[in-house]
Image (tube, grey):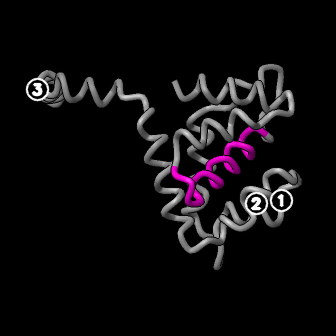
Amino acid sequence: MINRILMELYDDYEKGNIDSLIEFTKKTLPSDGTDKLFIGCVLIMFSRCNGFKARYSATREELLSIVKAIKEKLGDSNYLAFYVDRINREKGISKYLKDIVNDKNVDKYAGLIIEYLEQFRPRFVDDLKEDHKKNIDKYIESLNR
């Protein structure tokens, strides 16, 4: 579901419109800085989409990777701050992320976004393990004999 939403938001982004992204964010996440971080990370993802069917590069996994860059440290900063300060060339991205990436609460904001995105994690293997744990354990035992 989140991938479909991201594709639709990307379609609007390609037309130069991010109002739908802003509206989606207002309805979904707190307006305490988490919203700006989410919008900025989505814009980074969109700016990196390329190829014939670029909208298919706008995925939950890609967005999650970008948000997790906040947790990765590079000296006194984090990878996302480094990207915004040194690599980024898009003015819209800096508009949303410039002050947020160095905010003392940025890890909290990122945690909320990660928690939100994790709700959409595929669970086939987890469900299979949970529903059939006894059968899987017996099968593994039979292989070890």
Magenta-highlighted stretch: main secondary structure? helix
For disc 3, the marked residue is 134
Viewer-side label of 3, 2: 2
Q: Earlier in the sequence, mark 3 or mark 2?
A: 2
Nearest the viewer among 57 and 132 is: 57
Distance from label 1 to label 3 (Cα)?
Answer: 51 Å
For disc 2, the marked residue is 83
For disc 1, the marked residue is 87
Viewer-side label of 1, 3: 1
Asked if disc 1 and disc 2 are in contact, CB closer than 8 Å, the reply is yes
Does the magenta segment cover residue 78? no
**Residue at disc 3, secondary structure:** helix
The stretch in magenta equals: 30-46
Q: Position of residue 17 (x, y in %)?
A: 81, 33
**Residue at disc 1, secondary structure:** helix
Tell me the quarter of the picture where residue 135 sits. top left
Which residue shows up at 74% across the image and 44% down it?
A: 43
